[in-house]
Amino acid sequence: DGGITQSPKYLFRKEGQNVTLSCEQNLNHDAMYWYRQDPGQGLRLIYYSQIVNDFQKGDIAEGYSVSREKKESFPLTVTSAQKNPTAFYLCASSSWGSRSTIYFGEGSWLTVV
Amino acid sequence: AQTVTQSQPEMSVQEAETVTLSCTYDTSESNYYLFWYKQPPSRQMILVIRQEAYKQQNATENRFSVNFQKAAKSFSLKISDSQLGDTAMYFCAFMKHNTGTASKLTFGTGTRLQVTL
């Protein structure tokens, strides 16, 4: 089946620890995105990537890092510099052009313990 | 920068009735897209409907339709014959048109819709 796969579904982070969320897509989309959702809030853009080996900061990039070594993969690392990382994280992808629509994965819950 | 405002945090509708969710946006762009996404309790974001700003005709998808008023920067979602499965958070989103590059979504804060028996 074509789609966007995020893992793990649930992740717990200790204080001072880095964690990485995985995102893989088999839709042959060029662009990939990471959004953060806090309870009762809309989605805010963390990072996005238009092509392999290229990515740009979104609105709330501080404390996060990404890589885009393959077209299919766009992992997000939540570093210890992110002071309030507990949230729901959504990965998304899209093709370019006038018919571009952004599709989402099922999300990952990150909790600080 | 674009902003999207959803002024109704929560709404309730009885099964089989019609409900309208409101959304307004602010932008200086002339070419853009508007979306409604549904987020059920599973938290997956599901595309409901899409509207191109250059099209005057309102988009429809089965029981879902929009009222797009470009001059007023308004984009409301009408759900007809509401079903229990429509219970979810609904997000309005804006995307600037880009040619040959990726585009980003700007979201509103959402409206929680409860469909009751």
Image (tube, rainbow, N blue to C red):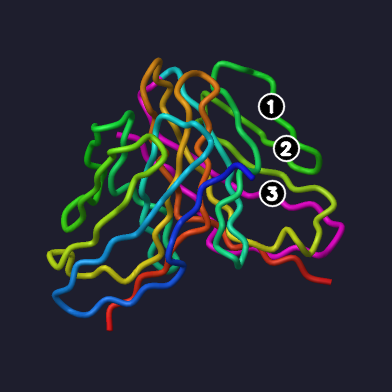
Q: Say which amino acid is labelled 1.
A: Asn
In the displayed orientation, state which residue is furthest to the bottom: A113
The local crowd at label 1, few if under 14, some if 14 to 19, many if 20 or more residues have their Cα within 10 Å, is some
| Lower position in the chain sequence, tag 3 or tag 1 | 3
Q: How far apart are marks 1 and 2 (CA)?
A: 7 Å
**Closer mark to the observer between disc 3 and disc 1:** 1
| Lower position in the chain sequence, tag 1 or tag 2 | 1
x then y, percent, for residue A7: 43, 61
The local crowd at label 3, few if under 14, some if 14 to 19, many if 20 or more residues have their Cα within 10 Å, is some
x then y, percent, for residue B113: 65, 62
Q: Is mark 3 on a helix, strand or loop?
A: strand
Which residues make up the magenta segment? B1-29
Magenta run includes residue B61: no
**Which residue is denoted by mark 3 in the rendering?**
B20
Asked if labels 2 and 1 touch by Cβ distance under 8 angstroms, the answer is: yes
Q: Say which amino acid is labelled 3.
A: Thr
Residue at the image point whose x is 51% and y is 27% from the top: A100
Q: Is residue B23 above or below residue B50?
A: below
User: Could you tell me which quadrant the N terminus of chain B lies in?
Assistant: top left
Residue at the image point whose x is 49% and y is 40% from the top: B24
**Which residue is denoted by mark 1 in the rendering?**
B58
- Numbered disc 1: what chain? B
Residue B65, which numbered label? 2
Is B95 in front, or is A99?
A99
Q: How far apart are marks 3 and 1 (CA)?
A: 14 Å
x then y, percent, for residue B50: 61, 33
The local crowd at label 2, few if under 14, some if 14 to 19, many if 20 or more residues have their Cα within 10 Å, is many
Magenta run includes residue B14: yes
